[in-house]
Image: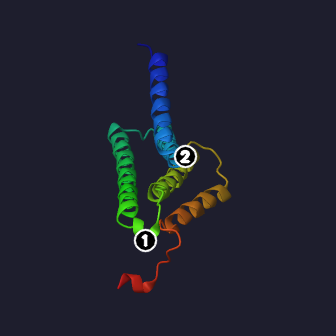
Amino acid sequence: MSAPDKAHELRALLTAAMSFVVALLGWVGIAVAIMLACMVLDYITGTWAAKAHAEWTSTRAREGLWHKLGEIVALCVAALCDIAVGVILSSAAAPLIGDYHHRGYITLIVAVWYIFTELGSILENAAKLGAPIPEKLIKGIGRLKKKADDVDPVPGKEDKPEDHK
């Protein structure tokens, strides 16, 4: 099989996987698909930057892939948390809160946080490749990541000092 055929098959596989995630998860799936696309772009640009500076090694490439796998595991843990919250609120708390519609807030927050982390890394890679990066873009992504850090997954509940006693 030729390289273009392999690339076409890989592209078809990625498209099918992302379509499945979006169809399964709705708007949270869109964030997950964007996160996965950012992960792939970060890995590709990181590889290009390392090769451009003769710093590429298979060991570092594997470490990068392990890092990406860790991000996927963390996202899966967030999704499991969302499932647990949905089950608890839809069954045990149903008499108190009425009909609960599972929203996937934890998964969304984690995906968005990783999106901004990956975008920052992609910008670093682009700079290593010689592209001029506007300072406002770097600062803007940093602020957005900080905002994602500060989001409370339980809307309307404020974190009070007495909650930590």
Measure how far apart labels 2 and 1 are at the Cα level.
55 Å
Tell whether label 1 touches label 2 (CB within 8 Å).
no
Residue at left offset 38%, top offset 47%: 72
Q: Secondary structure at mark 1?
A: helix
Q: Secondary structure at mark 2?
A: helix
| Residue 129: quarter of image | top right
**Image quadrant for the N terminus?**
top left
Residue 27 vs 105, above or below: the answer is: above
Question: Residue 144: x and y, percent?
Answer: 58, 61
Residue 149 vs 134, above or below: the answer is: below
Report the number of discs.
Answer: 2
Task: Give the residue type that dot 1 points to.
Answer: Leu
**Image quadrant for the C terminus?**
bottom left
Question: Residue 96: x and y, percent?
Answer: 43, 71
Task: Give the residue type that dot 2 points to.
Answer: Lys
Residue at left offset 57%, top offset 49%: 123
* Residue 49 can be seen, yes or no: no
Question: Residue 133: x and y, percent?
Answer: 64, 51
Q: Which mark is residue 128?
A: 2
Nearer-N-terminus badge (2/1): 1
Q: Of tags 2 and 1, which is closer to the observer?
A: 1
Residues packed near mark 2 inside 10 Å, few (<14), some (14 to 19) or many (20 plus): some
Q: Residue furthest top?
A: 1
The front one of 80 and 122 is 80
Tell whether 69 sits left or right of 144: left
Which residue bears the numbered disc 1? 96
Q: Residue furthest front?
A: 95
The front one of 73 and 69 is 73
